[in-house]
Amino acid sequence: MNYPKVFGTYYTIIGWLGAAGIVVSIVLAFFTDGLNLDFSFIIWLLLGSGLRRASSTARKWAIGISAFFTLMMLAFVSFGIGNAHIGNIRFEPPDVRYYLICGALFVLIGIPGLLLLRPQARKQFGPASEQTAAGSDGRADQV
């Protein structure tokens, strides 16, 4: 599996879906009472770009952000705090749809973060993949 290409494309798609969600939210704001803007799509697009370049730094950021979102979802579900929303429609913790949304986010964000921890991913995002940008001896060219 080509981890940089697959996960770079995956996070880029999540980013573009987030941007489309903002457009949908703006359109729905004309028919409902609230406007929900979520600019996290910028983070997903940047991660996608870095992962496609096989950057080990982007891989570490993707793992960290995935872990943060996963722990946040587990805390929300465990303690029944927060709310989940699709556009301007909000779901509170006793609602089954709240738990379904949290579970879907866990699958969409948590599992790719876990897959980036695999040794095969570490090898493809390692220093050898960045050697082409650094030079033939593995160090950045110094003047």
Image (tube, rainbow, N blue to C red):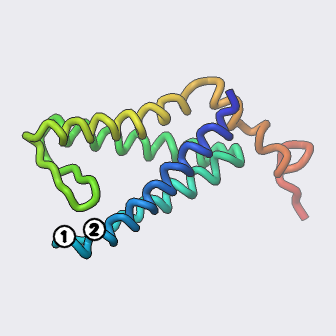
Front position in the image: 53 or 85: 85
Asked which quadrant contains residue 136, the reply is top right
Q: Which of 34 and 62 is in front in this view?
A: 34
Q: Position of residue 125 (x, y in %)?
A: 68, 37
Helix, strand, or loop for circle 1? loop
Label 2 Cα crowd, 10 Å radius (few <14 / some 14-19 / many 20+) = some
Label drawn at residue 28: 2
- The residue at 55%/33% (across/down) is 116
Residue lying at the far front of the rendered structure:
31
Horizontally, residue 31 falls left or right of residue 55, namely: left
Farthest residue, direction left: 94
Residues at marks 1 and 2 touching, judged by CB atoms closer than 8 Å:
yes
Give the CA separation, mark 1 to mark 2: 6 Å
Residue drawn at (49%, 58%), measured in percent from left and top?
43
Q: Name the residue under label 1.
A: 32
Question: Residue at 59% across / 40% down in the picture?
Answer: 7
Q: Which amino acid does label 2 sit on?
A: Leu
User: Based on the displayed image, in which of its 4 quarters is residue 36 positioned?
Assistant: bottom left
Q: Which amino acid does label 1 sit on?
A: Thr
The percent position of residue 77, horizontal first and vertical second, equals 18, 37
Structural crowding at the residue carrying mark 1, measured as other residues with C-alpha within 10 Å and reported as few (<14), some (14–19) or many (≥20): few
Q: Dividing the picture into quarters, in which one does residue 68 lie? A: top left
Residue 10 vertical placement versus 143 (above, below): above
Describe the element under mark 2 as helix, strand or loop. Answer: helix
Quarter of the picture containing the C terminus is bottom right
